[in-house]
Image (cartoon, rainbow, N blue to C red):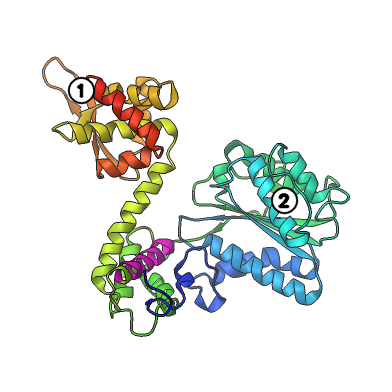
Amino acid sequence: MADEATSIFRRRELLRPQHVPQKDRIVGRDREIETVEALLKPAAFGDPPESGFLFGKTGTGKSLVAKHVTGRARGIAQMQGTDLTAAYVDCDQYNTETRAARTMAFEVRDAIDPDRYIPKEGIGASRYYDALWDSDGLLHESDSLIVILDEIDKLGDDTAEILSKLSRSEEAGKTGCYISVVAISNKTDYSDAPDERVASSFQDDPIIFPPYDANQLQAILERRSDAFKDGVLEEGAIQLASALAARDHGDARRALDILRSAGKLAEKDDSDRVTEEYVRQADEYSDLNRSIQVIKNGTPHSRYALYALAYLTKSKLKDSFSTGELYDAYCIVAEVAAGESLTHQRVLDLMKKWTLPEITESKHTGGGKGEGSYRTHRLLHDPDVVMSACLESSETQRDVLDALSESSV
């Protein structure tokens, strides 16, 4: 493994999607930055900020802009002598109201009073809200709080409740602290917008983040090229990485991931150059890594059904299977892994959802005389990789494989 002296990287963190760069490294988002600033900047001067929704596909700069503007507002607040606190919640990871409220409470605690004790478990969301705005709560002497709820759609039915608690807390006399909510969703057709209880607290129009084009992606990578030492990037490497990422709705995260992975592959080979070939290899690796993450994020029974297809693909001398064949194998997987199985129709519905991210291919076909029509399913990835992603526990995988091998499927 390369050490700092021999590494081809100078500032590896510049290629991490979580990194929030200075404004001069942010490309094509001037209008969005200005719009979000108009919402949040008043808090820096002790005035009430506004709340807003940010919509756009993955990798279009929503989280980056929200964090960047919040950071700038906090910097201005410090110069103005204003108490402005911020909390960031990844709702994909903290996907219930209680988990999100706990994360908020801990982020605010760490910023204001790190020694304050707050239980990590055993209490509900209301207790975490109390820790924020009770009479002796963390926000008792704060002027404003900005809460960024990233991927808010992952909160499901809890969305309206948490938005209501945050947006109406001041009006309800819970706190004298102004609270702004920046709600972010990757779903451009997200319909769980604020209900009547909170609609008045949000600006009328959501802020839409369009995909980056290939030129913008190239500019993003060029402004972070000093992540590598001088002379490391081969001419054409950045252009190729941005072109490959542009195929996927202009995803800047993917562009950064490809270039970072290309550097890691070059380092692994003890190469002092990141060539176009390493970029192509990184693109293939990124596709595989993304598919694995998509599978891991699937619901348990959708993964059991996918595991069944992967097992059949690996063990049989064909690559396409009817829903009936798939269902028989699924029932075995589900019974071992969860102790229950879903209906045939429900499993068919779950399998259809794997076609959109191109994990599987599904076709409706005629079965010949007397057989009627039916649907077939084909796996588009290596079955061993898919099986490993579907069932992460080695013990469960072993038990499932034993049960399948003993069956007649």
Q: In the figure, residue 378 lies in which quadrant?
A: top left
Q: Is residue 206 left or right of residue 145?
A: left
Q: Amino acid at mark 2?
A: Ala
Q: How far from the left and from the top, in percent, is residue 322?
A: 23, 26
Instruction: Name the residue at 26% across, 40% down.
Output: 383
Q: Is residue 52 above or below residue 387?
A: below
Q: Is residue 395 left or right of residue 146?
A: left
Q: Say which residue label 1 marks.
A: 373
56 in magenta = no
Secondary structure of the residue carrying tag 2 is helix
Q: Nearer the viewer, residue 47 or 225?
A: 225
Q: How far from the left and from the top, in percent, is residue 103?
A: 66, 50
- The tag on residue 251 is none
| Chief SS of the magenta region | helix
Q: In the figure, residue 64 lies in which quadrant?
A: bottom right
Secondary structure of the residue carrying tag 1 is strand
Observer able to see residue 195: no
Q: Nearer the viewer, residue 275 or 203?
A: 275
Q: Is residue 184 above or below residue 227?
A: above
Mark 2, residues whose alpha carbon is within 10 Å: few (<14), some, or many (≥20)?
many
Q: Give the magenta part as a residue range.
A: 250-266
Q: Say which residue label 2 marks.
A: 105
Q: Furthest-bottom residue in view?
A: 230
Q: How far from the left and from the top, in percent, is residue 306?
A: 33, 34
Q: Is residue 241 left or right of residue 111?
A: left
Task: State the separation of the CA atoms marked 1 and 2.
Answer: 56 Å
Q: Is residue 117 left or right of residue 341?
A: right
